[in-house]
Each structure stands twice: as structure tokens, then as C-alpha cells.
Amino acid sequence: MKRWLTIMALMFIVVGCRNGETNNSLVETDLQAHEPDEGIIIEEKEEENPTLSESDTEMEDAVVEKKEAMYKINEKTWAVEPIEEANEKIVLLTIDDAPDKHGLEMAHTLKALGVKAIFFVNGHFIDTEDEAAVLKEIYDLGFPIGNHTFSHQNLTTLEKKEQLKEIVSVNDRVEEITGERPRFFRAPFGVNTDESRKIAAEENMLIMNWTYGYDWEKEYQNKEALTQIMLNSPYLNHGANLLMHDRAWTSEALEGIVKGLQEKGYEIVDPNLLKMPE
Ligand SMILES: [Zn+2]
């Protein structure tokens, strides 16, 4: 596949700190677990994101085999909406900050359940050969790989060149490992910039945040509580875009969450059915 941007041969500084992500009232905080265990969670609030502009898309880049689009992402709510006659009682599963310690296990769980999810990966989790092998296995299990930047920094704090590195290096690396560039982009903390939107467009990536998630909140960091809230959240409705993370408790809760969603009549939507930028 043709590359539109050159590889920046600069070293990245992996920030071992913690961050948070916010979309309206919903806060994501991920611990980038280089530490042996989960560590401390810090929450940060951010403004709601401006809507996505699609101005800079002029790619004729070609594309991996795609299914006909049946759903689109609402750029204001980040919900998944049917384009025409598709089933509207669906939810999308997304796993962020992968592949850390539990991503592969989560992929196997989802595979056994016969459902798909997007794994949004950070570049610092795939820079060794062992880590690359894990990513390849997740990809080979049939899961789309999304770009969550190299080191999970707030893009508003970075120069354009740094944003380019943060985003494009991940696509280059994922392509090197799987043969396919990511088609989905999720900014750390859900905070995009004009530059990140431009880069996502140049890279033919669909930008998305999420509609709800809870696994970064202390009271939901166990299997039972997380399963309950994911299934009984007031935000669970048609087209919900579920944010989960590569975490022990989320991995443990995952099967119950998927089965519970299905028992409530929700279909887990295949991300390959999403309409991509033109
Ligand atoms: Zn994240």
C-alpha cells in the first residue's frame, strides 16, 4: 500500500505517566501499564471536541477488501448509525491502550464469542518483536487495529511535527507487522486537533471517540461491578460505542458483558461495516 507520509526517523519519548480522556461527561483514564500493576489513575477533563471536518481527504489509496458500508459514525455523538435498512439495535466494542497485558486474552475471548471489536493500539506497546507478535496474533484473529497514537499524549500539547510522528509512526509500524495500515483513529483522551484530523484524513482513517465506558473508574475496576454498569448504563442504547481498555478486570468482565448485551437483544456490530472517509 502506498505511503503518503515519510517515516520520521526520530526517537520517541515514551511517557510513562498517566492520562485521562473525556467526552462530555465521560472520562477515560488509562494507565499505560509499564508498571507491574495498575498504578494510580488520574482523571483529566477536556473540552468537548469540535466536529470533524472532512476537508482534506483526497486519497485514492487503495484499500483492503472492504464490506459494503452499512453503518456510519455520528461525528457529534460518536454513536453508530445505520445508513439504510441495517439493524439499529447494535453496539460497537472498542478496546483501547492495547495490546498491553490483556489484549490478546481479550481477543481470544471475543473470538470464542464470535464477535468483533476494534483494538486501538499505542505504538509503545508494539515496538519490540514480542509485542509485535502479540499484535499480529490479534490481527490474525480477525480484529481491526486502530491507531491510538504512539505514546498517548494529549495532541493539543504537541507541535504539528510531533503529532505527525505520534500518529503516522503507529500506522507504519502496524503495517509493518500486519500488512495493513489502521483504518480507525482515536485520539488520546478523545482530544483531536486540526492537525490530527488532517493526518487522519490523509491516512484514510475514520476518527471516532466513544459514547460510554467505565473501566477507568475506581468503583468499576472489578468484574462484577463493571459487567453490571456496562449492561445497565443509561448510555446503553442503539448504536452505543463502548469504550473498554486492556485491563485485567475488563478482560475478566468481557464475556459477561458481551453475553449480557446479546441477551438484551443487541448485536455486536462488525467494524468492517462502518463507512470510511471518502
Ligand atoms: Zn487511551
Image (cartoon, rainbow, N blue to C red):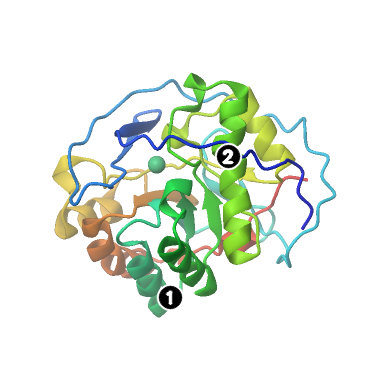
**Observer-nearest residue: 253 or 134?**
134
235 versus 160 height, above or below: below
| Residue type, label 1 | Lys
Q: Identify the residue under disc 1.
A: 111
Residue 16 in percent (x, y) is at 31, 37
Q: Looking at the rendering, which quadrant does residue 134 occupy?
A: bottom left
Q: Identify the residue under disc 2.
A: 167
Q: Quadrant of the N terminus?
A: bottom right
158 versus 151 height, above or below: above
Examine the rendering and report whether any part of residue 204 can be seen: yes
Nearer mark to the viewer, of 1 and 2: 2
Secondary element at image label 1: helix
**Observer-nearest residue: 222 or 155?**
155
29 versus 260 height, above or below: above
Q: Looking at the rendering, which quadrant does residue 169 occupy?
A: top right
State the CA–CA distance, disc 1 to disc 2. 28 Å
Secondary element at image label 2: helix
Residue 20 in percent (x, y) is at 33, 32
Residue 99 in percent (x, y) is at 40, 57
Q: Quadrant of the C terminus?
A: top right
Q: Residue at x 21, y 57 (%)?
A: 249
Q: Residue at x 56, y 28 (%)?
A: 162
Q: Residue at x 16, y 41 (%)?
A: 218
